[in-house]
Amino acid sequence: MIAQPQEMKTIRIKPPPRGVDLNLAEAWAHRELLYFFVWRQLKLRYKQTLIGAGWAILQPLLTMLTFSLIFGRLARLPSDGIPYPVFYYSGLLPWMYFTNALTAATNTMVDHQRVITKVYFPRILLPVAAVLAGLADFAIALVVLLLVLMPMYGVAVTAAVLALPVFLLLAVLTAVGVGLWLSALYAVYRDVRYLLPFLVMLWMFLSPVVYPSSMVPGPWRWLYGLNPMAGVIEGFRWALTGSAQPSGSLLVASTAAVGLLLLGGILCFQRLEATIADVV
């Protein structure tokens, strides 16, 4: 008998389509790799440190004490009736998660340049893993607030705490959206390393970390809410303390801004992903 020739498979390589191509099937196929990247980030975060995960408590705690002294006792900024330590700690909780996750996501493409240039995998997993890894530190700091600071100052948990996962999701999506922008740009332009510290500092003063959004005049709060972290931080304070519920216009504007940042980040990352391995 004459052996029949095997059918040849044709693999066509073509550029990504215009528009948004999430390619969720490919990302889902590499979900184990996402877990590996998250675990690696967690192991490297406090490698060769003396107190390890204790930094997740010390950083917001020491910053809270400084803010309470300078902006609370000396500057006498309002806190919407919330004790200063709880007010600042509940604002620093989402802010420090966001800044740490953003910094890690921005650096991740350059930090993994050897892997990127040798093996193909969905590059988007790297910044996403950096953002998800920060949730471990966030959880530790949140436990300190709920079990130590709030009982110490007589602030009780209310039913508003059920909304906390929503605002946490907004914080994660904001970090992913901005992280996609900056990680892709940093792989191409090293100027981003000098821009990032200035951006984080300026963004903090444009967010209600050291002051409440109630200081912003009512007609302008929707504009102030275009800063996505404004809605996230005010939402966290309200969910944790039950006081100072943020205005609806601010929350709607912040949620819309999160969606635009995420969409723009995916588009930017998608356009630059094909060239990252060549320039990183």
Image (cartoon, rainbow, N blue to C red):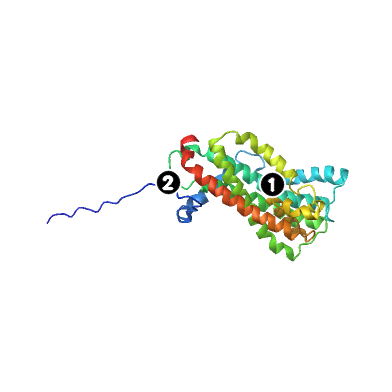
On screen, 59 above or below 254? Answer: above
Tag 1 secondary structure: helix
Would you say 126 lies left or right of 202 here? left
Mark 2 → mark 1, Cα distance in angstroms: 38 Å
Of pointers 2 and 1, the one earlier in the residue sequence = 2
- Hey, which residue is sitting farthest left in the picture? 1
Q: Is residue 137 above or below residue 47?
A: below
The residue under label 2 is which amino acid type?
A: Pro
2 or 1: mark nearer the eye: 2
| Residue 207, x across and y down, in percent | 74, 48
Q: Horizontal placement of 221 versus 2: left or right?
A: right
Task: Name the side, left or right, on which 134 lies relative to 63.
Answer: left
Q: Which disc is residue 96 wearing? A: 1
Q: Which residue is mark 2?
A: 15
- Residue 266 x %, y %: 54, 49
Asked whether the viewer can see residue 192, the reply is: yes
Give the residue drawn at x 86%, y 43%.
Answer: 75
170 or 137, which is in the foreground? 170
Residue lying farthest to the bottom in this orientation: 159
Q: Position of residue 5 (x, y in %)?
A: 20, 53
Q: Tell me if I can see residue 42 in this picture.
A: no
Three-letter code for the amino acid on which mark 1 is drawn:
Met
Relative to 68, is 162 above or below? below
Q: Is residue 6 above or below residue 105?
A: below
Query: What is the quadrant of residue 80 in the picture?
Result: bottom right
Q: Secondary structure at mark 2?
A: loop
Quadrant of the rendering where the N terminus is positioned:
bottom left
* Nearer to us in this view, 7 or 222: 222
Tell me the residue at 59%/51% (across/down): 262
Q: How many marks?
A: 2
